[in-house]
Image (cartoon, rainbow, N blue to C red):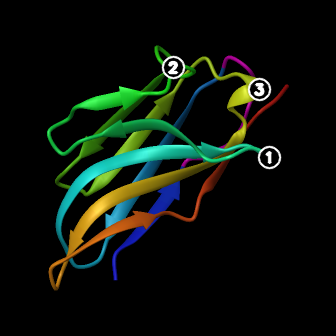
Amino acid sequence: QVQLVESGGGLVQPGGSLRLSCAASGLIFRINAMGWYRQAPGKAREEVATITSDGTTTYADSVKGRFTISRDNTKNTVYLQMVSLKPEDTAVFYCNADVFSLPLRRQSIWGQGTQVTVSS
């Protein structure tokens, strides 16, 4: 059973920074793309940033220039560095991974979510 565990959320003032982490554990053969998504109250879940196994990244227009996604393949971990946070960034942030687990099976795994609140 592959699991994703997120950490790093919290309360921050506008203009502040946070770094989210998401570590995958279990019987993992390979992790393809990993990504961060968020869901604000009353809104649909949206893609924030993704990163492939070779480091190619994509970002939502709303976070370009403020958020940076990265990963450490030796630790099966993906990070999201967030700076210049705005109140509209307030949401539950979820990690996702496209995983080949053992015995060989491809799965899309979600983390449990971590709350990010931007408020003065």
- Residue plotted at (46% across, 14% down): 65
Q: Residue 17: x, y in percent?
A: 59, 26
| Mark 2 surroundings within 10 Å by alpha-carbon count, few (fewer than 14), some (14 through 19), many (20 or more) | few
Disc 1 marks a residue whose amino acid type is Pro
Q: Report which quarter residue 106 is drawn in.
A: bottom left
Disc 2 marks a residue whose amino acid type is Asp
Quarter of the image for the C terminus: give it.
top right
Look at mark 2 in the image and give the residue it sits on: 61
- Left or right, 49 with reference to 26: right
Task: Identify the element where label 1 is drawn.
Answer: loop
- Residue plotted at (32% across, 53% down): 77
User: What is the number of callouts on the image?
Assistant: 3
- Residue plotted at (26% across, 65% down): 99
| Mark pair 1, 3: CA separation | 13 Å
Look at mark 1 in the image and give the residue it sits on: 41
| Mark pair 2, 1: CA separation | 20 Å
Disc 3 marks a residue whose amino acid type is Pro
- Left or right, 112 with reference to 100: right
> Residue lying farthest top?
65
Q: Residue 67: x, y in percent?
A: 48, 25
- Residue plotted at (15% across, 79% down): 104
Look at mark 3 in the image and give the residue it sits on: 87
Q: Residue 70: x, y in percent?
A: 31, 36
Q: Which is nearer the eye, 30 or 84? A: 30
Q: Report which quarter residue 75 is drawn in.
A: bottom left
- Left or right, 91 with reference to 62: right
Residue extent of the magenta highlight = 8-15
